[in-house]
Image: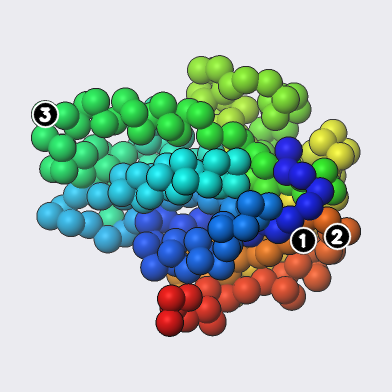
Amino acid sequence: MLPSRGRLVATGDLHDHPIHFQKVCDFAKLDKPDHHLILHELIHGERLTHGADLSWRMLAKVAALRLQHSGQVHPMLANHEIAQAFLQPVSKGAGECTQLFRDGLEWSFGEDAGTVEEAINDFIRAMPLAIRSESGLLCAHSLPAPIAMPKFDMGVLDRALDETDFTTRTGSAWSMTWGRGQTQDSVRALTDAWAVKLFVLGHKHVEQGAETPFPGVVILNSDHERGAVLAFDLAAPLPTAEQAVASAVSLASMGSMHD
């Protein structure tokens, strides 16, 4: 639970975009101890090196950032991380991502690739499904699709995850990170169960970087040229979804924060 003070920067999918990752980190101003940053969908980009995916480097950067700013950096579970940790096939522009990622580990670490893979999987399994604030904000990669709602465990955010939560199509963690096609009614059921005033999600290509499909939901996308992020004052009342979208910050507009 985030405190009712300070500032939060929420992102959408990053998919191994190192330039946008650096911009996000600079924008978050983590040198201030009450500033927070949420990151998700970190791996499986479309750029390959020698035919392999080296997006393990993004996970390493995030792990180092979390160690440097303990309690301020919040990596969050997303479907591509779950797919990698549980070797569930998932495809993107470059091909079947989980095998390309393992090829990248083998290319980078040789006979130590298995040890590195175990450490990565432990890191992924330690990530939470959602980050909440005292004001009623809930950030998650996605929400269950309407068809998954009858079997979805509404209590999943308040307990430790187990192996069944990651089962393809039926697990609650799987459903929450893979879900698409949400309706206002399906979201309202979660709003009521979790006392949420505003959801901030990813898991979708958003042409303008931020959009609201219906009241109480904002979808962010941070991995393309029009990618955007949101900044929240944790001590202030939450904006409406429409107000949040209007205040989204374009990553292209930031330029280099080091200039």
Q: Are marks 3 and 1 in contact (CB under 8 Å)?
A: no
3 vs 1, front mark: 1
Reading the image, the residue beneath label 1 is 233
Reading the image, the residue beneath label 2 is 236
Check the picture and name the quadrant holding the C terminus.
Answer: bottom left
Q: Are marks 1 and 2 in contact (CB under 8 Å)?
A: yes
Reading the image, the residue beneath label 3 is 111
Q: Secondary structure at mark 1?
A: strand
| Three-letter code for the amino acid on which mark 3 is drawn | Glu
Q: Secondary structure at mark 2?
A: loop
| Three-letter code for the amino acid on which mark 1 is drawn | Asp
State how far apart marks 3 and 1 are (Cα). 47 Å
Residue 129 lies, in percent from the top left, at 61, 36
Residue 209, above or below 135: below
| Residue 226 visible somewhere in the drawing | no
Residue found at x 26% / y 31%: 116
Residue found at x 19% / y 49%: 52
> From the viewer's perspective, is 77 left or right of 212?
left
> From the viewer's perspective, is 248 left or right of 239?
left
3 vs 2, front mark: 2
| Three-letter code for the amino acid on which mark 2 is drawn | Ala
Within-10-Å neighbours for mark 3: few <14, some 14–19, many 20+: few
